[in-house]
Amino acid sequence: MFKGSPKSVMTVAFVILGVLTLSSGIAAMMQRNLVHCALSLSITLAGLAGLYLQLDAQFVGFAQILIYVGAVAILIVFAILLTRENEPGSQSRYISNGYLGFGLALALFAVIGGAIVSSKTLGRGQVPAPEATVRQLGDQLMTRYVLPLEVLGLLLTVALIGAVIIAMQEKESKSPGGTK
Amino acid sequence: MTPLHGYLLISAMLFAIGLGGAITRRNAIIVLIGIELMLNAANLNFIAFWRFGPNPEALTGIVFVIFSIAVAAAEAAVGLGLIISIYRHYKTANVDQIDSMKG
């Protein structure tokens, strides 16, 4: 898709998408209002979809927009609205010894980033864009990966039925007994 | 600094952001959002290694990411169902107030 485009254009688009993704990711983790967190999360996921399109993975990019920005973000907003706190803003957003967590995340990034930057096996530079049409992908999914696909369908069915049962369990047990 | 380095650094940074949020925020839904961010960082790694890897015609990275997205969707559904159930029981979604099993 971007085979003929010059390198500088790809770099500019990469920087824009990367800054958008990371800054909205930080916003999703640090804002006080939970709905703002969910909206920042959807911006992060859309930026990731743009990065997938930059990497010539068209199907995954559009599936990311459909599933994450379309479905998961809406699901999270619904869950936020269903679990509203009674007294918002009266206590801290973070757990009592949260600085340990920040330190751990920073240390993890330092370790992984140092490993990436100092790695010598990663440098292959520009490679020609691979062909990944949806037709090839469907062929693979229907021949080589057909058993994992069926298992995945079973997993999704079980998980969704289980989620409904978990979410409605309290009301079922409260109505006949009445005592805890 | 090849393009693969850039993508891997973005992925590592996103993973660190998700981890930092998931282990420091008090609200259970934000913890779940952090876990989603970490899963997406792993997916970005898969796509980047597929794109710049030795034989991209095998489509292994793309198929793995599709499966990973589906499993993450199942995880989000079950996780949010659990959070709603816990909220009904404890009337809170703060992870440090749900301490019935604390010894």
Image (cartoon, rainbow, N blue to C red):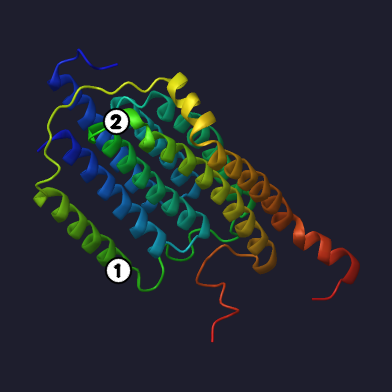
Q: Do the residues under discs 2 and 1 have CB atoms within 8 angstroms?
A: no
Dot 1, crowdedness within 10 Å: few (<14), some or many (≥20)? some
Which label belongs to residue B56?
Answer: 2
User: Label 2: how many residues lie within 10 Å, few (<14), some (14-19) or many (20+)?
Assistant: some
Left or right: residue A173 compared with residue A72: right
Along the horizontal axis of the image, is A67 left or right of A97?
Answer: right
Chain letter for mark 1: A
B74 displayed left or right of A99: right
- The residue type indicated by label 1 comes to Tyr
Report the residue at 58% width, 80% height from top.
B101
Looking at the image, residue A65 lies above or below residue B46:
above
Q: Position of residue A60 (x, y in %)?
A: 42, 30
In this rendering, is residue A63 above or below B24? Answer: above
Which image quarter holds the C terminus of chain A? Answer: bottom right
Q: Secondary structure at mark 1?
A: helix
Residue situated in front as seen by the camera: A118 or A178: A118
Residue that appears at 35% across and 33% down: A47
Query: In the rendered view of the protein, which quadrant contains the N terminus of chain A?
Result: top left
Q: Chain of mark 2?
A: B
Of marks 2 and 1, the one in the foreground? 2
Residue B18: image location, x then y, percent = 36, 53
Q: Residue furthest front?
A: A143
Q: What's the CA distance linking mark 2 and mark 1?
A: 42 Å
| The image quarter in which residue A24 lies | top left
Q: Position of residue A132 (x, y in %)?
A: 36, 23
Work out whether residue A167 or residue A179 is closer to the camera in this orientation and state it. A167
Task: Tell me what residue is drawn at x 50 percent, y 45 percent.
Answer: A35
Mark number displayed over residue B64: none
Q: Label 1, on which residue?
A: A99
Q: Is residue B88 visible?
A: yes
B73 or A154: nearer the viewer: A154
